[in-house]
Amino acid sequence: MREVLELGSYRRARANRTRNLERVFGIFPRLRERTRQAAGTLSGGEQQMLAIGRGLMAEPRLLILDEPSLGLSPLLVEEMFALIRRLHADGLTIMVVEQNVAQSLEVADQAHVLENGVVTLSGAARDIATDPELRRSYLGL
């Protein structure tokens, strides 16, 4: 599992690999506990942590997360969105593609709603959260 994290710094941030590994373990203490475990045997939540940790190893300017809450328990979903908030507060730009609309809009600055591949709403997340068109898009009302 540790090798998967280290692969994240293969092309970028190789010189800072040890420091970044400690940062990832600070964010995800469970990964430190599982360093000798095969990545494929991790739980779904731990695999999400590993994927995000691998991305962080490259010291990205933009972190893109595709459905980070998919398959997670409600408690882990809360933890995932708390992590997204914390990383963003630390200055990292994050793009989240997510069907969990309510929680996504709570952490987002900007939002874009896609319907059948077409952007139907776009703007400040706080404005979209209260837009009646959002209910129509997701609930068909």
Image (cartoon, rainbow, N blue to C red):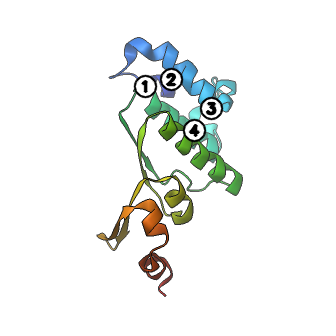
In this view of the protein, which residue sits in the foreground, 111 or 13? 111
Q: Earlier in the sequence, mark 1 or mark 4?
A: 1
> Do we see residue 1 in this rendering?
no
Give the labeled residue for mark 4: 49
Among numbered discs 3 and 4, the one appearing first in the sequence:
3
Give the number of the mark in front: 2 or 4: 4
Q: Which residue is mark 1?
A: 7
Residue closest to the far bottom: 141
Q: Is residue 2 left or right of residue 96?
A: right
Q: Which disc, if any, is residue 28?
A: 3
Labels 3 & 4 near each other (Cβ < 8 A): yes
Q: Residue at x 49, y 20 (%)?
A: 20
Measured Cα–Cα span from mark 1 to mark 3: 17 Å
Image disc number at residue 3: 2
Q: Is residue 88 above or below residue 136?
A: above
Q: Nearer the viewer, residue 100 or 5?
A: 100
What is the CA distance from the residue labelled 3 to the residue labelled 2? 16 Å
Residue type at tag 1: Leu
Residues at badges 1 and 2 in contact (C-beta under 8 Å)? Answer: yes
Question: The disc labelled 4 sits on which kind of residue?
Answer: Met
Task: Say which label, 3 or 2, has the lower sequence index.
Answer: 2
Q: Position of residue 51 (x, y in %)?
A: 50, 38
Location of residue 61 with respect to 43 vertically, above or below: above
User: What's the residue at 58%, 49% (across, down)?
Assistant: 81
